[in-house]
Amino acid sequence: MSTAPKAVVFHTSTSSTELDCNDDDIVLITHSKSGANCVLKKFGAHVLSYQTAAGKPLIMISKDAIMDGSAAIRGGIPLCFPQFGQPDKSYLQHGFLRRNKWTVVEGSEFDTDDAAGIKLELELKDVTVARGDGTWGNDTKLNCKCILTVSIDDKSMTNTLEMQNLGTDAFDFQVLLHTYYLVAMGKALDHELCNVKGFEGYMVDDKVSGETYTLGSDPVTIPDVIIDRVYTPPDGTIDLNLTIAAGVDNLVELTANGDVDGTKVPVSGVVWNPHKIKAEAMGDFGSDQYNDMICVEPGLLSNVPQLKGGKTATFTQVMTSI
């Protein structure tokens, strides 16, 4: 594993792009035993790439992503906290984690036979962008610290976000990992080759049509329009277990779980693809790249207990190439 500045490779579609790193903002994790690797950017603690030992890339970055820290990065794994979307208008959509530079936790790097990884951290006192002027503004009584652990082995990557309430006042929060999966061979609109299984019985909130309904037995596929749907688990379902078909010869198992102060919280999921019209309207996204990606985003979104002073919440996703 290396944190030295160097050129690194991430995947924008069916091709790869080399990122020329002239500063210390890039972290490269390599699992020496297997050869699997992961590229992170300290800005946003943002995963740009994960490639299995077999050389299969699972994560997609927009070819037009803004990498200079002036905006959130399009693609990869943006971290959403303390909110997903913008239910609280006093600060920016998806919160402030993805808009600020994190610090590597000293001595956290590891590379063993089983796995390799690293920890990055961000305290509220170091958040300079996207705090807003209300709930999390400079005058807030709230305080928090977040620690992201990224661990990889030959065919899987684990992302764990630990959220600590450093203050005395409790706060409401949501957390979500906005993961962009690379769809091999540009087959995102092919329902046989790109779909998500495991949401059967979940309540669906379709943000495009405005409909709500319970999903039947059919897998989730990308229609010929924008898809933006929230999947809320039925009573009794806690952890999320999905199978994602992401193009030709690319199958991923996704599991996710979370807790607040040791109490497990049901995990919701979001499926998103901008399709042609929205893709063309985004300045940081290739107009045809909707064919190359599907966002499958686990998170704690509904009925999340407040995080009380001095307490910790955790959220973990594991993606495994199968």
Image (tube, rainbow, N blue to C red):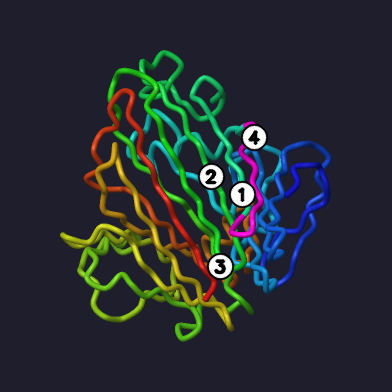
* Residue extending farthest front: 113
Q: Earlier in the sequence, mark 2 or mark 3?
A: 2
Q: Earlier in the sequence, mark 4 or mark 1?
A: 4
Q: Find numbered disc 2 in the image and state the secondary structure of the residue it sits on.
A: strand
Residue type highlighted by circle 3: Met
Residue beneath disc 1: 117
Q: Residues within 10 Å of mark 3 (few under 14, many from 20)?
A: many
Image point 41% across, 13% down: which residue? 139
Task: Estimate the spatial distance between the alpha carbons at disc 2 and disc 4, rounded to whole Å.
Answer: 13 Å
Residue beneath disc 4: 107
Q: Position of residue 182 (x, y in %)?
A: 59, 68
Q: Are marks 2 and 4 in contact (CB under 8 Å)?
A: no
Q: Residues within 10 Å of mark 4 (few under 14, many from 20)?
A: few
Q: Is 113 a magenta residue?
A: yes
Q: Position of residue 60 (x, y in %)?
A: 61, 62
Q: Earlier in the sequence, mark 4 or mark 3?
A: 4
Q: Are marks 2 and 3 in contact (CB under 8 Å)?
A: no
Segment tinted magenta in the rendering? 106-115
Q: Is 281 a magenta residue?
A: no
Q: Tell me: 208 left or right of 280.
A: left
Q: Are marks 4 and 1 in contact (CB under 8 Å)?
A: no
The quarter of the displayed image where residue 8 is located: bottom right
Residue type highlighted by circle 1: Gly
Residue beneath disc 2: 149
Q: Tell me: 267 left or right of 149.
A: left
Residue beneath disc 3: 293
